[in-house]
Image: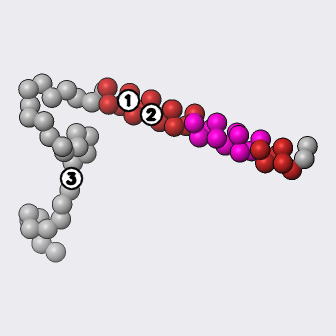
Amino acid sequence: MTIEKLFSTIILVAFLVTIFLAMGSYAAYKWRESRRPKLDGRETSDEPVYFERITLGADDDTPR
């Protein structure tokens, strides 16, 4: 096997693996979005559903 064939095989395999990983991550994203809790009449919001934002600052009641 010449070096050109080896490099072209490596590039082809890397390309195909990248395409399959992209398709898999898109499918996982769509599956996660389908499991997202429905709003059921609540107002639409841009805030994340799964995570709660923690802020440090003025509303922190603990002394340091």
| Mark sitting on residue 50 | none
The residue that appears at 91% across and 43% down in the rendered structure is 1
> Which tag, 3 or 2, sits closer to the chain's start?
2
Indicate the amino acid at tag 1: Lys
Are circles 2 and 1 on residues that touch, CB within 8 Å? yes
Badge 1 is on which residue?
A: 30
Give how far across and how far down residue 29 sits, in percent.
39, 34
Task: Assign a secondary structure to mark 2.
Answer: helix
Badge 3 is on which residue?
A: 53
54 on left or right of 12: left
The magenta region covers 9-19
Please identify, in this view, whether the residue under mark 3 or under mark 2 is nearer the observer.
Answer: 2
| The quarter of the displayed image where residue 9 is located | top right
Quick one: label 1, few (<14), some, or many (20+) residues within 10 Å? few
Give how far across and how far down residue 7 sits, in percent.
78, 48
| Mark sitting on residue 26 | 2
24 on left or right of 35: right
Indicate the amino acid at tag 2: Tyr
Are circles 1 and 3 on residues that touch, CB within 8 Å? no
